[in-house]
Amino acid sequence: MTKFSVICFRPRTAARAPAVLTLALAAFFFKVLAAPLAVHANPAPAEVTAEAFYTIGPEETPAAGEERVLLKATKAALADLTPYVENYCRQHGVAVGEDELSALLAWAADISVVDRKRAAAGAETRLWCQVKGTVAEFRLEQALKLVKDLGCLAAYRRNEEILNANEQEIAALRQPAGPPGSEKDAAAAPQAAASAAEKGKTTPGEKEAREKALKAEKASRQQKIAANEKVFLAAVQTARGQRFLAGNEWERAKDAFNLALAYDPAYAVARAGLGAVWYAQNQCARARIDYEAAAALSPDSLYALLGRADVYRRIGELDKALADYARVAEIAPRYWPVYYNRGLIFRAKGQPEAAAAEFTKALELNPKHIPSLVGRAQAYRDTRRYDQALADLNAAIAVSPRDAELLLLRGSVFQQAGQEEKALADYSLAKTIRPDFFAPLWARAVLLDQLGRSSEAAEAYETLINEAPAVYARLAQQAKERLRF
């Protein structure tokens, strides 16, 4: 570890400064020197605690009540952890919007229950929950990889929308209905009925009809609360599944999404989440089933369309992938990865002109995206537009000058353009940068062979025979034997 020493120069004849003054100066310089560090230092992932209360109504289930109080406590803890996550994003130069920040917190925070209590309050039950929340930096790093993914963020937004709407709905259902004659005045119904009967205004038939109406109203509200709870429990499990997915905890994510679907088989966000888990595990057949089911439940949802398009692209159903990406581009025209993916597909289909156009759209929206720059360069090369291909590759290499694969690609373009010496220089530099990367040496050997520089080619082939993997060594041996004749 480097050691730093503070050296003070002082005339030998100068009087010694008073101790108080020396300490004051030391404190001042410490503040001055430490201030920049304090500004940029990320605070320790402080442990926070939060609590919440919730009262279960007589028609609500304990399972839903426990989840509601836990959700309230979790939201309070996430609010307290927000400054840490905001500072982390500033330190790493990541600009995040409000929804992205909310998703980062939800996916990166570790929330655990510290204590729970419940107490009876007449026909209702009062719940209390205390949680502990922390944010680990490695979880933030994982979550940041997903928060800029439109599909993941769209799924998070939709689930949050459902949770918020559900909270408003249950609050309304817990309140007695408003119009006169409804359950709002059910408690006063016996007295009102007696008073009316005395005045001769209520007949037995009217009283019976009123009681039936109140029972029907109560049954209807019970049904609505039951339906509300199913959606709520599905949304809560989906939020957990999304967090596990962000942390690469595949099995826990699958369990959470499956539990969500057990509560509500038509919950599209959970179905798409399950598809995302299968896709991450490279089980495309199962991912396809879930993404197609999610798209059938929610045809224009970005999370279902993007997920299904990615699966189609991976399994080679390129026209279907193009159609889904096109629909995403209609819904979110500024989402540049769609154009990049379409460019890859057009290249795979042997349509370089269309590929170049898509990569150009991606670069217009994100000029710093090197893969789009490289993809366009390859498309230009395929159409023999070598100057444009080299311009893109030069721009990419300026950003990553020690990328051996980029140098190999530029060398191949130089070679096709008839600039053999520049091609040889790039092949040599790529091999120097990555000694274990033998593709540039093979390309150099073949080019030397084609140029009739047999001794140099033989030397390169010999190196491949002695050092390269079997596939290159075998090809080099055959080529070297051919040089003898």
Image (cartoon, rainbow, N blue to C red):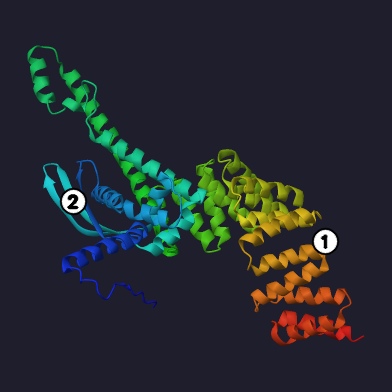
Which is closer to the viewer, label 2 or label 1? Answer: 1
Residue drawn at x 53%, y 51% as measured from the top left: 291
Residue named by callout 2 = 128
Depth order, front residue of 196/145: 145
Callout 1: SS: loop
Q: Position of residue 139 (x, y in %)?
A: 40, 62
Q: Is residue 382 above or below residue 124?
A: below
- Alpha-carbon span between mark 2 and mark 1: 73 Å
Image quadrant in which you'd find residue 295: top right
* Residue corresponding to mark 1: 417
Farthest residue to the right: give it. 485
Task: Say whether residue 145 is left or right of residue 345.
Answer: left
Residue type indicated by callout 2:
Trp
Can the viewer see residue 294 in this picture? no
Name the residue: 77% across, 57% down.
Answer: 381
Q: Earlier in the sequence, mark 2 or mark 1?
A: 2
